[in-house]
Amino acid sequence: ADRNPGQPEFLQAVTEVIESLWPFITDNPRYAEHGLLDRLVEPERVIMFRVAWVDDHGDVKVNRGYRIQHNSAIGPYKGGTRFHPSVNLSILKFLAFEQTFKNALTTLPMGGGKGGADFDPKGRSPGEVMRFCQAYVSELFRHIGSDTDVPAGDIGVGGREVGYMAGMVRKLTNRSDCVFTGKGLSFGGSLLRPEATGYGVVYFVEEMLKHAGRSLDGARVAVSGSGNVAQYAIEKAMAFGAKVVTISDSSGSVVDEDGFTPEKLAVLAEVKNHLYGRVNDYAERVGAKFLPGEKPWHVPVDVALPCATQNEISDDDAAILIKHGVSCVAEGANMPCTAGAVARFEHANVIFAPGKASNAGGVATSGLEMSQQAMRLFWTHEEVDMRLQEIMRAIHQSCIDYGTKNDGSVNYVDGANIAGFVKVSDAMRAQGVI
Ligand code: NDP
């Protein structure tokens, strides 16, 4: 803590992971030798830089840009770019640390990184957004590259922004290799990247349920959120025979006891993706119940998939879900369950998947985007989907291998942390003290 003052999120993430790893490290002390843990928690490189740009009124604006290159022991740094006023060193260091474990779990050779800027895209004109993106990468470009560091999008950075940044890097370097993922299909993007996180969550849940002797077929499912991850999770859950009865956004929740249908999902996509509407607009169109300001965790369900935002399942929400019979929870969003909620699930024998395992399908498909661009060929939708399913199965197997307890039950949090840690640590040990 003395070495990282003012970085509460980073300290929290490190503490949680080390606590989860501690019994394993005690049993396997070689993983504490040669300063391995001290090296693992220290980013290999932190880049902070000035981003100066000119707004539509001709005024000069100055933001702070960052790239945390946390760990490259198993491959080039890989992780998203966040443009949000809350961005600071602590949050990006926490995200880069977590990303290192998530990427290791995907089975692909990707190290961990994260970047961004304290720029608020809300209310900015398209021209301002483009100039900001160009100013941001006009410094960043010298620190990234297809074999060095491959950023992607995150909050505030979608396909449009990735396109501007990838284009500017191509111009500055005179090279067209893969320096960003999440690109458009016409310039190096991959099929299925938009679907990958939501589909991946459901593939993971199906594996968890199969391991417990059950399946999604006929299960009642609560989904939160109504954006990218939520929509594709709903689509895939329906395909597995589940009945999805809730969605939400920051205005409230929709409960639909009849369950989603492909037609209703098309209405949701129209409302959210094209009309930029709210879930109550959707509820009105399909005749479902809208609960203003409420979370979607108050209906009886078998499975809960939080796919909106951080800390959206509190300790109390978890208690209600348990009371109503939930038996499986998988994180689609990053850190949607508070530590108290996770402890409650564990205590009630609810099978729980942490985001670093269950939502890793997105970054895994970004890894597949890198492979396709390097090979200069494109895989079909089916080929990418097949690889995504294989990867989610492999992540699940890693959790089983490292998270099965003496009584035969599986702690997916410990399993994911230990599996990611072992992979990165073995690579670091083999490469000596550097
Ligand atoms: P989107 O912006 O597409 O969707 C986010 C959804 O969450 C929206 O429906 C939004 O509602 C809702 N939401 C935001 N804040 C709240 C809140 N306070 N209460 C209730 N609902 C809220 O993002 P994504 O679907 O891409 O991402 C969702 C989560 O998944 C994030 O945590 C992200 O980091 C994580 N994730 C995403 C990946 C991806 O590939 N997209 C990969 C891995 C993780 P509203 O419209 O009202 O803002």
Image (cartoon, rainbow, N blue to C red):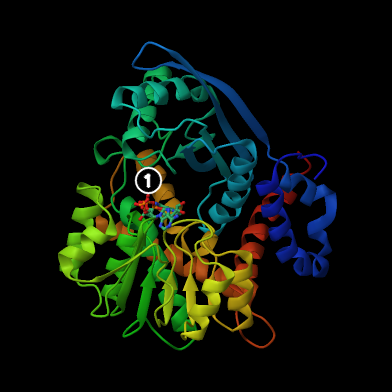
Residue 298 sits in which quadrant? bottom left
The answer, for residue 383, to whether it is visible in the render is yes
- The percent coordinates of residue 278 (x first, y second) are 28, 54
Could you tell me which residue is drawn at 33 percent across and 54 percent down? 228
Left or right: where does residue 408 sit relative to residue 246? right
- Furthest-top residue in this view: 58
Could you tell me which residue is drawn at 41 percent across and 66 percent down? 294
How many marks on residues?
1
Say above or below: 215 vs 155: below
Amino acid type for the residue under numbered disc 1: Glu
**Label 1 residue SS:** helix
Front-most of residues 43 and 94:
94
Q: Quadrant of the C terminus?
A: top right
The answer, for residue 387, to whether it is visible in the render is no
Judging by the rendered image, the residue that carries numbered circle 1 is: 369
- The percent coordinates of residue 235 (x first, y second) are 27, 67
- The percent coordinates of residue 251 (x first, y second) are 36, 57
Left or right: where does residue 23 sit relative to residue 322? right
Could you tell me which residue is drawn at 55 percent across and 37 percent down? 87
Left or right: where does residue 270 sit relative to residue 358? left
Residue 218 sits in which quadrant? bottom left
Say above or below: 19 vs 151: below
